[in-house]
Amino acid sequence: MYDNILFPTDGSAGSEAAAAHVSELASAFDATVHVLHVVDTREGGLGVSGAFVHEDSQAMSGVSPETGYIGRHEEVDADEIEAELTAHATDLIEAAAGSTDGIGMTTAVEMGTPHSAILQYADDRDVDLVVMGTHGRTGVERYLLGSVTEKVVRLADAPVVTVRADESDGE
């Protein structure tokens, strides 16, 4: 039924909770898991998704750990920032891949608008199911920041399973 399962991850507690579901589904259907992280390249997008400066990570050069944004007063090398963001993304997908031992897997880092890149990746690889975590934002915070998961749910051709982190995990 499911041959290819897409697991987009941003390293959040929601993504970590979704990893358990991905493992169970992939084992049950002998499916290949595609672990994907999207580096948000929209202007002003740094830190919005939580993907660039994670609470547990050290601040990257030129990126404020408080806001996750590149300081406008500092001169930054775009190639250097992109390399650091890609390295951080690689660490995230390796951690996510490590939680799904014994399952056929591919990993990828894409650049772009997260929901668009996830949808494109799913279409390009004939994904049968998308399993992703949600931050559990509501109200004004969700309206202002948007929801990558919500957009994927509304626009994906494949079914989407969403997993919210337990309240006890700080979400």
Image: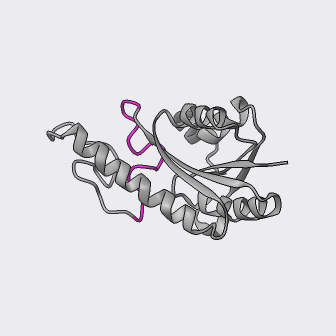
- Which residue is painted at 65% across and 60% down in the image? 104
Is 132 in front, or is 140?
132
Is 41 in front, or is 135?
41
The magenta stretch spans residue 55 = yes
The magenta stretch spans residue 140 = no
Relative horizontal placement of residue 2, taking residue 121 as reference (left or right): right
Q: How many marks?
A: 0
Residue 18 placement (x, y as % from top left): 67, 59
Residue 71 placement (x, y as % from top left): 23, 42
Q: Is 117 situated above or below 162?
A: above
Question: Residue lying furthest right in this view?
Answer: 1
Is 139 in front, or is 104?
104
Magenta stretch: dominant secondary structure: loop
Q: Is 162 situated above or below 30?
A: above
**Quadrant of the rendered structure where residue 150 is?**
top right
> Which of the image's four quarters has the C terminus?
bottom right
* Region of the chain picked out in magenta, as a range: 42-56
Residue 88 placement (x, y as % from top left): 38, 55
Say whether residue 147 is visible: no
Relative horizontal placement of residue 60, taking residue 9 as reference (left or right): left
> Which scheme is used to colour this image of the protein?
one colour
Residue 81 placement (x, y as % from top left): 27, 45
Relative horizontal placement of residue 3, taking residue 1 as reference (left or right): left
- Which residue is painted at 67% across and 64% down in the image? 103
Q: Is 58 situated above or below 61?
A: below
Say whether residue 102 is visible: yes
**Quadrant of the rendered structure where residue 143 is?**
top right
